[in-house]
Image (tube, coloured by chain):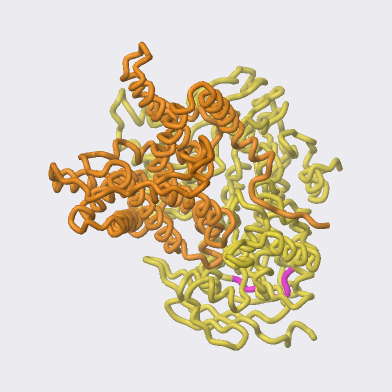
Amino acid sequence: METTISPPRIRTWLNDFGISAVIAVVVIVAIFWGYVTSPQVTTAVLASTLRQSTPLVLGALCGLMGERSGIINIGIEGQMLLAAFIGFLANVYTGNLLLAVLAGVLTGAIMGALLAFMSVTLKMDQIIAGTVINILAFGLTGYYYQQGLTTQGKLLPISLGPLAEIPLIGPVLFRNPPITFATLILIFVIHYVLFYTRWGLRTRAVGEHPSAADTVGINVYFVRYTNVIIGGAIAGLAGAYLTLEAVGSFERAMTNGRGFVALAVMIFGKWTPLGSWGAALLFGLTTALQTQLQFGGRLAIPHQFIGMLPYVLTIVVLAGFVGRARPPAAIGQPYETE
Amino acid sequence: MTKVDAPIVLEAKGVTKRFPGVLANDRIDLKLRQGEILALLGENGAGKSTLMNILYGLYHPDEGEIWIKGEHLQLGSPRDAIARGVGMVHQHFQLVPVMTVAENVMLGAEVTRAGGRLDRREAARRVRALSDKYGLRVDPSAVVEDLPVGTLQRVEIIKALYRHADILILDEPTAVLTPQEANDLFRIMHDLTEQGVSIIFITHKLKEVLAVADRIGVLRGGRMVGTTTPAEATEASLAEMMVGRKVILQVEKSAAHPGRPVLQVENLTVRDERNHVMVADVSLEVRAGEILGIAGVQGNGQRELVEALTGLRPIESGRILVEGQEYTSASPRQITEMGVAHIPEDREKHGLVMAYSIADNMVLNQYYQSPYASGPVLDQDKIEDHGRLLVKEYDVRTPSIFTLARNLSGGNKQKVIVAREFSRPVKLLIANQPTRGIDVGSIEFVHKQIVAQRDRGVAVLLVSAELDEVLSVSDRVAVMFDGRIVKTLPIAEATRERLGMLMAGSEA
């Protein structure tokens, strides 16, 4: 008798992601139809979708690293914002883009360590701990912000040779700046780590049933610290993306709620990296469409209503309209070793 | 080789552990020989769990030494104990519900292939090998949350064996099992010792100790008060060692004289949070002056039945009548005011307000009525007098009536609830697991009180997963399985074997 065991099988996958699959099919058909009618606009919308989705999916990866190990992170917004700011400053004063990105990532990691310290060691309420992070980031960046600074250069798109020449897919997927490429890789890496490696198994065990992990000799605190810090670093990368790759300058509160939308993305993606990517693309698409519709000027609806789209989608997702999602069982509960 | 001169594999010498205000272990000596089953008997709070947690490296002893296989050890964490071959099956299963059996088994000691990739196939193969070797039937690919408790226990044992444990600590392993599952477990334990595994078996059930142990150690108040063997001991002598005084194990009661029907349940169907039907078309009747016991393995709808009867859970269909009066959708307060007393299953969650004093907890069912309140104002003096009276009458061991409920021991918490529920005239008593997790002395007390209520003409519905309790207290027994009452028997026809079969779902 040989039974193999594997993570999500086709049927459970359909149960879990059925609605998402339907949405995906609809979107793909719409894209195809769009490409046939006006290829240029469609390519522009899709490229914009990917750009918009990048900080969201990074934020969601940050959130799910934490939550899979049992720590709720509502400080993603603050982690991104401060990382964006520090990365920006690092570039302004050194002129080095790589150094600036590293500074952003490091800032995020430090903010992650702070969150872990408050949630794991001090056993604070995790919502409060996240709020502390957010307020800290808004305060610091608001206080030290100086107008008129701009970055020295921006991270520029790289074309992956002939791949970038494929119609539609080429310019969208294979001609992107470095952080966007890094994000695409990171999604798969984290998915692999979470579901196919020792570390992932331990992380999920800690997030579901920490005392079960403890009794087989797994250090719950260590697992939580590590995941929250790595998550913070990923949020830091999202911050670096905003200033160094997307905009090229810093503005007050420039994260603009992306850290919170990232949480919705994570939930919509059922706490999985691939699911979050799909959700982030959907959110990115609504934002891209919104921009396109506004500039296209062909709609009679006031632009404020179109501008609401991503946020309405967030509310719909968080209100639980989209499928059954089961969070890790132990999230939000500080673990007390005996 | 006889077990008496087998080598000692584990020894505790003078182990002492203090918690703030409590001496949990007081110079405990313990020896475990290879291939034997050592039963550790003691009441709640006697220090059994503390001692086991020390042996497993979860606690550090303040004084004393642990020797494992001739080595003096400082156990820093479970990792050290696991590395020395000590495995523990906790009372509350330490399994991750959403993961498979194989994933749970390998957690913390994973098998990986190149690149750190988990080798789930190899893990499954090892689980199957262990399950074949020791007769522990499990499917490695099953998801833990879908499995019955009896199987979960086998998973826990495999988990320990997978780590090459040859010293197994089983903490109250039979608490959640049917008699058949418990017998299965005893057979497995026996097979394991045949293969050289040594077992420490913690329990407070006297019958089990006499049935399976090679030696018995009794703990009381943090001290090892004696060791004996099943051949030398009887239930009565063990109970006396545990409690420190003579205990009457048999509930003394005269024959019941059932009167008019008090509780009538007709075709009751109830669903749980996940919308599963948990109580399916149940009809039953309890008369004044009789005790109807509901036997069944936990999770067969008893909780939902009690919650529906006490107004805590909406009813899908069916009727509930008390003394002929309909109270199908009444609120808990209306039900209370109709003269229904409720001893809930979870005393800490539903029985007491943990942050309130004993006195306040004792008026929770009537604080808003005279004499405890006039209008919106509470009469503290009356509440305190009431508290003092009940503490004395029900022998609640507490420094004062102002002590917070959370600071009481399990048995005393239970006494506070019993006192409150019996402190006013009632017609119907619904008692769900009234003696769960409390010591032999308190069990005796609670049983006496329940029988006394019956003799006063109260109708009693007793729900219990303890077969002994159902058998010794009830006048009639109904067996619940899979949401249905499968059989109702007069007590004279109810034997352990028959009830055990019915509880497992097979018609006897």
**Does residue B478 appear in the picture of this structure?**
yes
Taking the image as shown, residue B257 lies to the left or right of residue A188, namely right
For the point 59% across and 53% down, the residue is B96
Q: Which chain is orange?
A: A
Query: Which residues, given as a range, are shown in magenta?
Result: B212-218
Quadrant position of residue B195: bottom right
Taking the image as shown, residue B369 lies to the left or right of residue A248, namely right
The image position of residue A254, as x and y in percent, is 26, 39
Q: If the image is split into quadrants, where does the C terminus of chain B sit?
A: top right
Given the current orientation, which residue lies at the most extreme right position?
A: B508
Taking the image as shown, residue B322 lies to the left or right of residue B19, namely right
Asked whether B232 or A242 is in front, the reply is: A242
The image position of residue A70, as x and y in percent, is 45, 51
Q: Is residue B372 rendered magenta in the image? A: no
Taking the image as shown, residue B492 lies to the left or right of residue B345, namely right
Q: Give the number of callouts.
A: 0
Q: If the image is split into quadrants, where does the N terminus of chain B sit?
A: bottom right
Asked whether B234 or A92 is in front, the reply is: A92
For the point 38% across and 31% down, the residue is B367
In the image, is residue A258 above or below residue A236? above
For the point 85% across and 40% down, the residue is B507
Asked whether B93 or A37 is in front, the reply is: A37
Quadrant position of residue A104: bottom left
The image position of residue B481, as x and y in percent, is 74, 39
**Does residue B492 appear in the picture of this structure?**
no
The image position of residue A244, as x and y in percent, is 29, 48
Quadrant position of residue B302: top right
In the image, is residue A143 above or below residue B329? below
Asked whether A291 or A204 is in front, the reply is: A291
Q: Which chain is yellow?
A: B
